[in-house]
Amino acid sequence: MENEPVLRAETIAKQYRDTLPRQKWNTTTSPTVFRLEATLNPAVSAVIQEATNLECNSVDDVLQLNAKITKTFTTICGNIETSNNSGSVDHERKSKRKYLRPKHRWFDKECMIAKRELNRLAKLYGKNPRNVHLRETYYNKRKAYRKLKKEKSTDCDSALIPLLT
């Protein structure tokens, strides 16, 4: 049993030869072009050739082979990231928040900022419900937000009532 190979790199190479790597590609490159470039690279092809010829008879051999393969693929992925960053293809980012028109006239920028702050605190408080300081901060901010909404609403209403009469 000691003479039998534990794992042959050749069988692994055959098994994963047809699988496409999960990578975000820009318009100039594709997985097949990348695979061709990787095999034409002398450093990568030397490591692949060495891995296919290597027989693993012990656990240490397998670990060494795994380390070599991991290092090679890390280098390849680093080359992909640098080539993608230097490319001329720019992706437009979508805005995170879509600005919605407020339902009430009195809901202005001050209310919007207070609401965002309250939502941020609510999220933190939901993750850490036993944090006493966070709980006090959240409930104080909620009380202040409700008071602000009520003041803005009554000010708007009191300004409109004389215009209607």
Image (tube, rainbow, N blue to C red):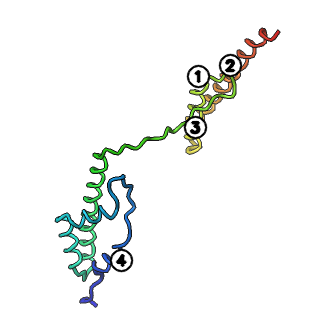
> In the depicted view, which residue is nearer to us: 116 or 42?
42
Mark 1 closeness class: few <14, some 14–19, many ≥20 residues within 10 Å: few
Identify the amino acid type marked 3: Val
Query: Would residue 28 be found to the left or right of residue 127 on screen?
Result: left
Is 11 located above or below residue 30 in the figure?
below
Which dot, 4 or 3, sits closer to the camera?
A: 4
Which dot, 4 or 1, sits closer to the camera?
A: 4
Q: Earlier in the sequence, mark 2 or mark 4?
A: 4
Q: Are marks 2 and 1 in contact (CB under 8 Å)?
A: yes
Identify the amino acid type marked 4: Gln
Placement of the C terminus among the 4 image quadrants: top right
Disc 4/disc 1 C-alpha distance (Å): 60 Å
Disc 2/disc 1 C-alpha distance (Å): 10 Å
Residue appearing at x 68%, y 24% in the figure: 149
Q: Which residue is mark 3?
A: 132
Q: Which of the 4 quarters of the picture holds residue 6?
A: bottom left
Q: Which of the 4 quarters of the picture holds residue 17?
A: bottom left
Residue appearing at x 25%, y 59% in the figure: 75
Q: Which of the 4 quarters of the picture holds residue 152?
A: top right
Q: Earlier in the sequence, mark 4 or mark 3?
A: 4
Residue at the extreme front? 28
Q: Earlier in the sequence, mark 3 or mark 1?
A: 1
Q: Which residue is mark 2?
A: 152
Q: Which residue is mark 4?
A: 15
In what element is the residue under mark 3? Answer: helix
